[in-house]
Image (spheres, rainbow, N blue to C red):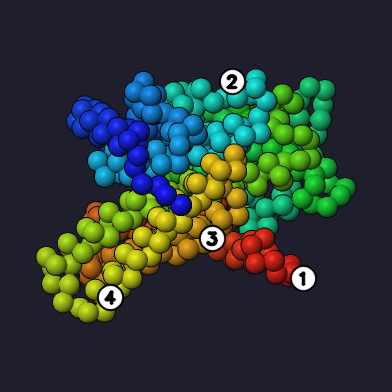
């Protein structure tokens, strides 16, 4: 695999750097991390700037090399992250692009790219987390609509979202994987109640969501009825394979900052800590190479990243936790100060071995779909 910059990529990198250098000083101050309406406005404003400059669809329509260049350069320049646009840009949008009808792509994709509409993810339920296929939220066909009742939990960005990528059960008579349907639900529909959930870090990017006979048009179904599990695998392949790519770049930057901080406060004299940071440097270099491979595979295959995304997600989740444990060693007693750099990141890293499929689930996928081992009983 050769992802070295060619003439076109070098020009793309130079043009992007010049644009970032001009636009970043003009951004408004970042909002309070706990103010999600303010964060939505900030994140969507940044997305609009990307759209106007021609960079909004880099996650979807750029070459693998250009996509990775974009992530490298925006992270190195300190540009805003996708934030509230995470689900729309990196989950729902790519799924609709791959599985939606021309009318659905025309309706939903441009507003995501412009930063006009935000999506949330309605997959997990109180009794269907790791075993997602056992979900119980029901959708009953009534003419040209589905009537949906049930509840969801860990619904990312629900309190500021316009749309929800929603998994529902449309057939309970057969095997659980075969009765699921993928719907796009408008969040302003009657019957939806959203209750934000406060995380360990104090933020509310997740929520409980209760659905009481919510009517969702049949036209909002992506894929065929009862074929939602296959469509969901497309969504999860993007979530696990490419959605965290930018964070690998961020972790490599943090690792360099940790080394600098350790040299300043004397922790660099600890040979064990130095070895730990060196091993993490090798780990994230390897993850970046795996990222390149996954993105190239997706491009060559004309679709999602495939099961290789589970390998990436499994190792990245643990590497991120190890990185911020190392940060706590560097900070010492200051690691308990929520106002210090890396402390909130350390708390949020605890969720990574659960979010987007637990590590146990990823190991099962790797064992069954890559290694060809039999399914457990």
User: Vertical placement of 205 versus 330: above or below?
Assistant: above
Q: Is residue 35 visible?
A: no
Q: Secondary structure at mark 2?
A: helix
Q: Quadrant of residue 238?
A: top right
Q: Residue at x 50, y 39 (%)?
A: 90
Q: What secondary structure is found at the residue carrying circle 3?
A: helix
User: Is residue 10 in sight in this rendering?
Assistant: yes
Q: Position of residue 351 (x, y in %)?
A: 47, 58
Q: Is residue 140 left or right of residue 149?
A: right
- The residue labelled by disc 4 is 275
For marks 3 and 2, the one nearer the N-term is: 2
Q: CA distance from mark 3 to mark 2?
A: 33 Å
Instruction: Look at 69% across and 37% down and name the residue there.
Output: 182
User: Callout 1: few (<14), some (14-19), or many (20+) C-alpha neighbours within 10 Å?
Assistant: few
| Cα gap from disc 1 to disc 2, whole angstroms | 44 Å
Label 4 – label 1 distance at C-alpha: 41 Å
For the residue carrying disc 3, how many other residues have a C-alpha within 10 Å: few (<14), some (14-19), or many (20+)?
many
Up/down of 31 relative to 201, above or below: above
On residue 106, the disc is 2
Local SS, label 1 = loop
In the rendered structure, the answer to whether residue 332 lies left or right of residue 184 reads left
Between disc 1 and disc 3, whose residue precedes? 3
CA separation in Å, label 1 and label 3: 23 Å
Q: Are marks 4 and 1 in contact (CB under 8 Å)?
A: no
First in sequence: mark 4 or mark 1? 4
Distance in Å between CA atoms under marks 3 and 4: 24 Å
- Residue identifier under label 1: 377
Q: Residue at x 42, y 49 (%)?
A: 2
Which mark is on residue 311? 3
| Residue at x 51%, y 51% (from the top left corner) | 294
């Amino acid at each position: 695999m050769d992802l070295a910059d060619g003439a076109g990529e070098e020009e793309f990198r130079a043009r992007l750097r010049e644009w970032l250098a001009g636009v970043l000083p003009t951004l408004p101050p970042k909002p309070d991390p706990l103010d999600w309406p303010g964060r939505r406005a900030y994140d969507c404003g940044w997305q609009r700037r990307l759209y106007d400059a021609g960079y909004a669809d880099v996650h979807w329509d750029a070459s693998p090399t250009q996509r990775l260049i974009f992530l490298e350069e925006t992270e190195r320049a300190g540009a805003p992250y996708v934030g509230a646009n995470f689900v729309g840009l990196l989950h729902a949008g790519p799924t609709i692009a791959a599985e939606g009808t021309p009318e659905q792509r025309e309706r939903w994709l441009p507003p995501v790219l412009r930063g006009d509409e935000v999506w949330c993810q309605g997959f997990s339920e109180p009794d269907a987390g790791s075993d997602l296929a056992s979900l119980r939220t029901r959708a009953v066909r009534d003419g040209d609509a589905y009537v949906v009742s049930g509840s969801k939990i860990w619904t990312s960005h629900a309190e500021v979202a316009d749309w929800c990528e929603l998994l529902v059960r449309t057939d309970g008579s057969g095997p659980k994987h075969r009765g699921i349907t993928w719907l796009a639900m408008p969040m302003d529909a009657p019957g939806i109640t959203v209750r934000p959930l406060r995380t360990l870090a104090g933020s509310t990017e997740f929520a409980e969501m209760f659905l009481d006979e919510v009517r969702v048009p049949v036209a909002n179904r992506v894929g065929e009825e009862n074929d939602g599990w296959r469509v969901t695998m497309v969504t999860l392949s993007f979530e696990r394979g490419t959605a965290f790519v930018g964070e690998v770049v961020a972790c490599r930057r943090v690792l360099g900052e940790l080394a600098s901080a350790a040299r300043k406060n004397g922790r660099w004299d600890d040979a064990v800590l130095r070895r730990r940071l060196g091993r993490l440097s090798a780990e994230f270099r390897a993850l970046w190479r795996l990222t390149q491979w996954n993105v190239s595979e997706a491009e060559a295959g004309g679709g999602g990243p495939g099961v290789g995304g589970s390998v990436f997600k499994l190792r990245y989740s643990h590497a991120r936790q190890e990185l911020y444990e190392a940060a706590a060693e560097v900070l010492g007693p200051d690691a308990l100060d929520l106002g210090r750099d890396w402390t909130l990141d350390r708390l949020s890293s605890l969720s990574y071995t659960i979010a987007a499929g637990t590590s146990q689930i990823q190991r099962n996928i790797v064992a069954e779909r890559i290694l060809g081992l039999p399914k457990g009983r």
